[in-house]
Image (cartoon, rainbow, N blue to C red):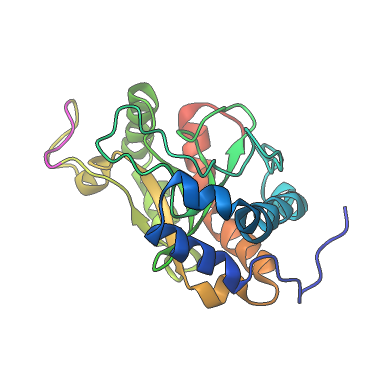
Amino acid sequence: MVTPRKNTRHFRPNLFKFLRDLESNNNRDWFKANKSRYEDHVKEPALQFISDFGLFLRQVSPHFRADPRSNGGSLFRIYRDVRFSKDKRPYKTHTGIQFRHENCRDAHAPGFYLHLENGQVFAAAGIWHPDSASLRRIRDAIVSDPARWKRINRAKRFCERYELSGDRLVRPPKGYDPDHPLIEHLKYKDFIGVARLTQKDVTGDGFIQRYAKLSRRGAPLVKFLCEAVGVPF
């Protein structure tokens, strides 16, 4: 695989222009008439980014996958699942890319993520909505080695770009000491480091190298979570 040049640009402003137009025209007739714009400005650049990022990802960890398939790979579908939702808009107005662990088949596993949306662009590293067993194992790992947990999320390399984020319980989780020094962290239902970006960041030259650097900064958090849930890093 050839490493992309530093001036390589995968994403361009027309990606965000399409997403803005979709926000105002979120219906099947409009999307059908503009599907070629989606393919040319959103889907194909995202799949090329995923394919090119594979080399960088292997340097972070050999156990994560950059899967450039059109369906079932690292690129989330643009179609919303509206079966159980009151919101019947058929399309997502963002593009999501997740580099998942080789042992996991869904989004609820440790991984690296890129979110492209008008007004909300970010990179993320961590785990989103883990199942109850995995959540308990993560909390137990924090209780078992609080010093390591603090080193990871207080490290300068992490804090310079990331902030710990995710949904949290209002009250301490059952089975854990309410007076634990890290109780606010034990309340998390997600364990995600979020690095805020701008559209200019993403559409500028060499963004793939900068995203790789962000992934390396988030790797210690992902490694901790992998070890907690019992998958290799």
Give the main secondary structure of the magenta stretch. loop
Q: Is residue 159 left or right of residue 211?
A: left
Check residue 71 for magenta coloring. no
Q: Position of residue 48 (x, y in %)?
A: 73, 54
Q: Looking at the rendering, in which quadrant would you find the C terminus? A: top right
**At 45% across and 71% down in the image, what residue appears?**
160
Check residue 173 for magenta coloring. yes
* Figure check: 175 above or below 55: above
Q: Position of residue 151 (x, y in %)?
A: 42, 55
* Figure check: 17 above or below 40: below
Q: Residue furthest top?
A: 133
Taking depth in this image into account, of 23 and 101 the one nearest to the observer is 23
**At 37% across and 53% down in the image, what residue appears?**
150
The quarter of the picture where residue 135 lies is top left
Q: Is residue 135 visible?
A: yes
Q: Position of residue 62 (x, y in %)?
A: 72, 40
Specify start and end residues of the magenta stretch as a single range. Answer: 170-174
The quarter of the picture where residue 178 lies is top left
**At 65% across and 54% down in the image, what residue appears?**
36
Q: Is residue 139 left or right of residue 201?
A: left
